[in-house]
């Protein structure tokens, strides 16, 4: 009996069987646009084609690349869920395939992300496919990834960190102020992290990290590295001569960070401002402080050993000088 069926009848049976199968099978995403890379200000078209869509709800949803934030619904069915004029949704249907085409005009940086086409099957399940939109934009250094100032003690290690956003992924390089040699050698270093071991006081200063990806202008951040170290005292004139009744200056030069507390002693007793003594301090670059004691109208009791003492949170130091009598006055 089967052999007597005509060719047209067999063909009709095949078509009817295929039609019934299509009607009973569930929806599926048969096409979604591949990854898109655009410049700011351009436009992009994202297409999602659905077979057997019937009465199922189809929507577009956006999330950031690492899916760390809540997703934003862009459309449900044939209606946009956003009010921005830059977004447009076009719906077409041909045979058994429905096309949900999302257009974004005047692209901005925040449009970058994952765009997910969803078929809502029921309250607990959905069918999805995702296309990523990359937006070329200049690098932006992330403020919360580093501080403007890093303070370490001499001998400790330091880690200077810079992270940046941008597309393409920015490359980060480091250099010092005035192109000084880096503690690790050379004038530049490439990488997100600049590790400095066993810090010396000479390593303190200004460091620049620069992010560049060839789009727009590079972004540069300044990081100040402060290295704490104990005072180091030098005495320009270890022996000072002056005649009676004349004035004279005795001084010491202290290099330290943080700024030290400086005090003077003569023959074991601390000297204070007032009477025969005037004490002044002058700061200069490289954490250097010059402390000067002016002795007015020298009397015999002013001669002797003077000790300059300096201390900070890291340590302390002292230096000694001698003031002795001279027959011939010394002009200041």
Image (cartoon, grey):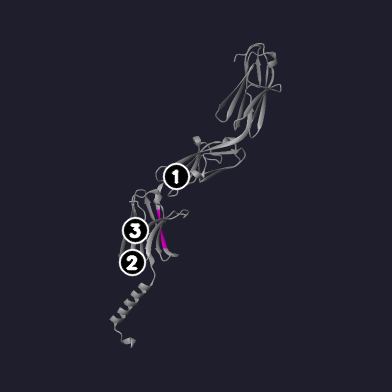
Residues under labels 2 and 1: Cα distance?
43 Å
Q: Which residue is mark 1?
A: 140
The stretch of residues the image draws in magenta is 128-133
- Any mark on residue 255, and which? none
The picture places residue 226, in percent across and down from the top left corner, at 56, 36
* CB under 8 Å between discs 2 and 3: no
Mark 3, residues whose alpha carbon is within 10 Å: few (<14), some, or many (≥20)? few
* CB under 8 Å between discs 2 and 1: no
Residues under labels 2 and 3: Cα distance?
18 Å
**332 sits to left or right of 211:** right
Which of the two labelled residues, at mark 2 and mark 3, occupies the earlier sequence position? 3
- Any mark on residue 79, and which? 3
**320 sits to left or right of 283:** right
Question: Residue at 59% across / 27% down in the picture?
Answer: 289
Question: Residue at 40% across / 48% down in the picture?
Answer: 109
Mark 2, residues whose alpha carbon is within 10 Å: few (<14), some, or many (≥20)? some
The picture places residue 110, in percent across and down from the top left corner, at 40, 49
Q: Which residue is mark 2?
A: 97
């Amino acid at each position: 009996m089967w052999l007597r069926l005509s060719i047209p009848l067999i063909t009709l049976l095949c078509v009817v069987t295929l039609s019934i199968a299509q009607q009973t099978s569930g929806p599926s995403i048969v096409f979604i646009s591949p990854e898109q890379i655009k410049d700011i200000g351009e436009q992009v078209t994202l297409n999602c084609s659905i077979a057997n869509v019937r009465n199922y709800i189809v929507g577009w949803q956006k999330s950031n690349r690492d899916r760390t934030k809540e997703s934003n619904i862009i459309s449900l069915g044939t209606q946009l869920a956003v009010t921005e004029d830059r977004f447009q949704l076009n719906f077409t249907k041909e045979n058994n395939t429905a096309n949900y085409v999302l257009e974004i005009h005047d692209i901005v940086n925040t449009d970058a992300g994952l765009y997910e086409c969803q078929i809502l099957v029921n309250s607990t399940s959905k069918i999805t496919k995702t296309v990523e939109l990359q937006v070329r934009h200049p690098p932006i250094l992330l403020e919360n990834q580093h501080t403007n100032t890093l303070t370490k003690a001499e001998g400790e290690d330091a880690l200077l960190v810079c992270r940046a956003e941008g597309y393409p992924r920015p490359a980060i390089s480091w250099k010092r102020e005035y192109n000084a040699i880096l503690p690790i050698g050379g004038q530049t270093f490439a990488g997100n992290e600049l590790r400095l071991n066993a810090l010396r006081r000479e390593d303190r200063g200004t460091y620049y990290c620069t992010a560049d990806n060839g789009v727009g202008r590079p972004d540069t951040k300044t990081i100040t590295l402060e290295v704490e170290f104990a005072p180091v005292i030098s005495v320009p004139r270890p022996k000072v001569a002056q005649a009676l009744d004349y004035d004279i200056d005795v001084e010491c030069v202290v290099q330290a960070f943080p700024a030290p507390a400086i005090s003077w002693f003569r023959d074991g007793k601390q000297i204070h401002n007032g009477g025969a003594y005037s004490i002044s301090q002058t700061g200069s670059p490289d954490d250097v402080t010059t402390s000067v004691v002016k002795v007015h109208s020298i009397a015999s009791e002013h001669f002797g050993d003077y000790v300059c003492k300096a201390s900070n949170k890291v340590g302390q130091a002292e230096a000694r000088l001698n003031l002795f009598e001279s027959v011939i006055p010394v002009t200041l």
